[in-house]
Amino acid sequence: MEHTQPKLASVEKQNLIEIQQLVKTFSNAAGEFTALRGIDLSFQEGEFVAVIGKSGSGKSTLLNMFTGIDHPTSGKVLVGGVDIYAMSESKRSLWRGRNLGIVFQFFQLLPMLNLLENVMLPMDYVGMYEVNERPKRAMELLRMVGLEEQAQKLPRAVSTGQQQSAAIARALSTDAPIIVADEPTGNLDSRSASHIIDLFTELSDRGKTIVMVTHDPSMTKRTSRTVVISDGVIVNETIAQALPLLSQSLMKELSAKVEKLHFQPGETIIRSNESVEKFFMIAKGDVDVVLHGRGKDDLVISQLGMNDFFGEMELLRGGKSIASVRAGSERPVELLALPREDFNWLMQESPLTEKAIGDIVQKRLGEKKQADRRKRNRLFGRK
C-alpha cells in the first residue's frame, strides 16, 4: 500500500531548506561541547552546494540536523515549509524517506543484498511505486550511473567507486527533491570522484537540490555555491567566495570585522580623485566603475558583480581613487566594508591573498590604460 504523505512543494527561487538559529550541544562525562552555534542558513531548489570545513568543524552535525537524523538543542529546521522537528520520530523517518536521498561516506549498502535490491530498498520502505515496477525503476537508476551490468552483484564484488555510484542510485530511488552527500568522494580515486561530481551536476541541472559535505576545498570548483563552517559557525559566504585563499580561521575572524553597507541603484559609492579608506566586497547586486567625461559623457570601464571586490588598488598603492564607483542601475547593492587598518592586517596575515589581490591590481591598471585610450580617441573623434 502506497503512503499518501505529500512530497515537498517546488517553488522557483524559494528557499527549500531554512535553518534558523540552530544550536547543538553534546554532553558527556567530560562536560558539554557546542558543535553548532546559532546557525542561520538556507538552500534553494536546484542549488549544488558544497559545505566545507576541517574535521570537527560541525559539518556532519549540521547535515544530521537538516536530515532529521539528530535533534537540535534549540532552533528550527524548515524543509519545504515543514518544521521537521514538530513531527514524531516515525513520521519524520517516513518524511525523510520520501523527501531526502542520503549518500553516506561509507556507502551503507546492505552486504547481503545485491546492488539492484539495495536500490529498491527505499522504495519498499516508503511504499513508492507498484511492487512489480520497482525492479525496473532500480535498473534504470543503475543504468544511469553505469552499473547495469553489475546489478546482480553483491557490494563486496564491485569497486569502491561502483559502490558509491550504487549508493547514489539508491539515494535517487524515491525521486527525492533533496540529495545530501556526506564526504561522497573521500574514499575514491580522482577519476571516480570526478564521475560522482558529474552526476551531482547533472542532477542539479534537473532541479534537484544537492548538499555535499566535504573537507576537500577542490570540490568547490564544480559547485554553484560554497558554505564554509568553522568551529560551529558559518563563515560569511561573500568573504569565502571573494577571498578563497584565506584560511578558514582568517575567514571566520574577518567575518567579525566587516561592516554591511547598502546603496540604492545609481548611488555613488566612491568618487573619482577622493581618498579610499575601505576595502569593499559585493554581497548583493552589481557596481559600475566609471571614468567621467565632460557633461554626461561617462565611460563605464568595468562592471563588478556578487563576490567581486574593489578599493584594493588605492589601499595597496596609495593615492586617491582613479575612477568613480556607483551602484548598478537595476537593483540595490549590499557591500561588506573593511577599514584600511584591518585590510593591512589581512594582507600581513595572508601573503597568498596579498599576491592574488596584487595581480588583480595590475590587471585593472591595464584595463584603466585601455579605457583612457578609448576615452581620448572618442574625444578627438578617432576610432
Image (tube, rainbow, N blue to C red):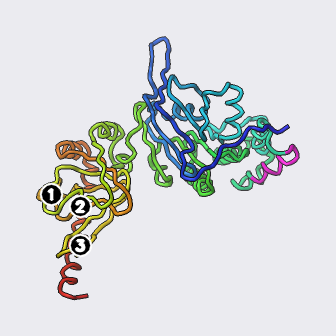
Q: What amino acid type should be assigned to the residue bearing mark 3? A: Asp
Q: What amino acid type should be assigned to the residue bearing mark 2? A: Val
Q: Secondary structure at mark 3?
A: loop
Cβ atoms under marks 1 and 2 closer than 8 Å: yes
Q: Secondary structure at mark 2?
A: helix
- From the image, tell me which residue sits under label 2: 361
- From the image, tell me which residue sits under label 1: 317
Residue 173 visible at all = yes
Asked if residue 139 is among those painted magenta in the image, a careful observer would answer yes
For this orientation, the residue located farthest to the left is 319
Q: CA distance from mark 2 to mark 3?
A: 22 Å
Q: Establish if 109 lies above or below 172.
A: above
Q: Which residues are magenta?
A: 130-140
Residue 163 visible at all = no
Q: Residues within 10 Å of mark 1 (few under 14, many from 20)?
A: few
In this view of the protein, which residue sits in the foreground, 267 or 289? 267
Residue 82 in the image: x percent, y percent? 61, 36
Q: Residue at x 74, y 55 (%)?
A: 143
In this view of the protein, which residue sits in the foreground, 44 or 155? 44
Cβ atoms under marks 3 and 1 closer than 8 Å: no
Residue 158 in the image: x percent, y percent? 71, 45
Residue 41 lies left or right of residue 243; in this view the side is right
Q: Secondary structure at mark 1?
A: helix
For this orientation, the residue located farthest to the right is 132
Q: What amino acid type should be assigned to the residue bearing mark 1? A: Arg
- From the image, tell me which residue sits under label 3: 298
